[in-house]
Image (cartoon, rainbow, N blue to C red):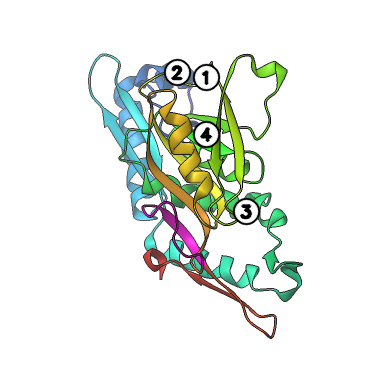
Amino acid sequence: MEKLTRNNRIVVVTKILTENPNKVIGLSTFAEKLNAAKSTISEDILIVRKVMEKLNLGSIETIAGAAGGIKFIPGMSMDEKKSFALELCEMLKDKKRIVPGNYIYMTDVMFDPHVISKAGVILASSFADKDIDYVVTVETKGIPLAYEVAKNLGVQLITARRDTKITEGSTVTINYVSGTSGRIQQMSLSKKTLKPHSRCIFIDDFMKGGGTAKGIVDLLGEFESELIGIGILIDNIGSEKKLVTDYTAIVDFLGVNDDGEISMIPSEKFR
């Protein structure tokens, strides 16, 4: 391979790092791909690191040791997080989103790459220091957001099912109580899904009473694993007696008034 200019090398280094967040990549990988000495690659990485940090695009961490290298940790400035939360609130305040029962239509938002990619960075950054093994969600609308969080944390996504599937093999199924209706519901997870003693976070699109999150805690307990964090896009703070209290939400849903107006504000952390 012909020698590349520094500008060209920096483009390639940046692309590789941003496409593999939280994955440790050795300098030899870059050196072989770019046909350059490790010392040259180190200088290129230093430039990328400075620009990333200056523009609040994330950070590049150096991992020492024989199996070491560097890894990119996606990030966003607090001002950008607040701006995104406000933008999301305005998007969700549209009266046309109200469906019978005073529910809010959110499917388009949950499958909008522009929205979910930013929300994924925000929630992932909240758990970046927690040493996560898996991101867990429940089918189906929360999957795109959970996937983005898992990608940014560099870990695997696990999806609990409402109904068991033959293709999942042996499964563990639990009953849990809905936090809003009080009805008994089920969720299941394949026995092949995660290793015992894993550390997980739960990601979902909307929290009402917290019944699903509490169910995830119980389900993970069957695998001798623990839930160490919860990330939510929208929190219905009007729900009383939530079954879980320790979680991170991006925006708060206050309800729909008599005039059909939706009240939505950034969560306290992003105001």
Extent of the magenta region:
239-252
Q: Mark 3 points at which residue?
A: 114
Name, please, the residue furthest toward the front. Answer: 183
Residue 35, which numbered label?
2
Q: What residue type is labelled 1?
A: Glu
Above or below, 110 against 144 in this view is below
Q: What residue type is labelled 4?
A: Glu
Q: Is 222 covered by the magenta stretch?
A: no
Q: Name the residue under label 4.
A: 19
In the image, is 37 to the left or to the right of 232? left
Q: Is residue 11 visible?
A: no
Above or below, 61 against 32 in this view is below
Name, please, the residue furthest toward the left. Answer: 65
**Of the residues under marks 3 and 4, which one precedes in the sequence?**
4
Residue 257, which numbered label?
none
Q: Marks 1 and 3, how far apart in space?
A: 37 Å
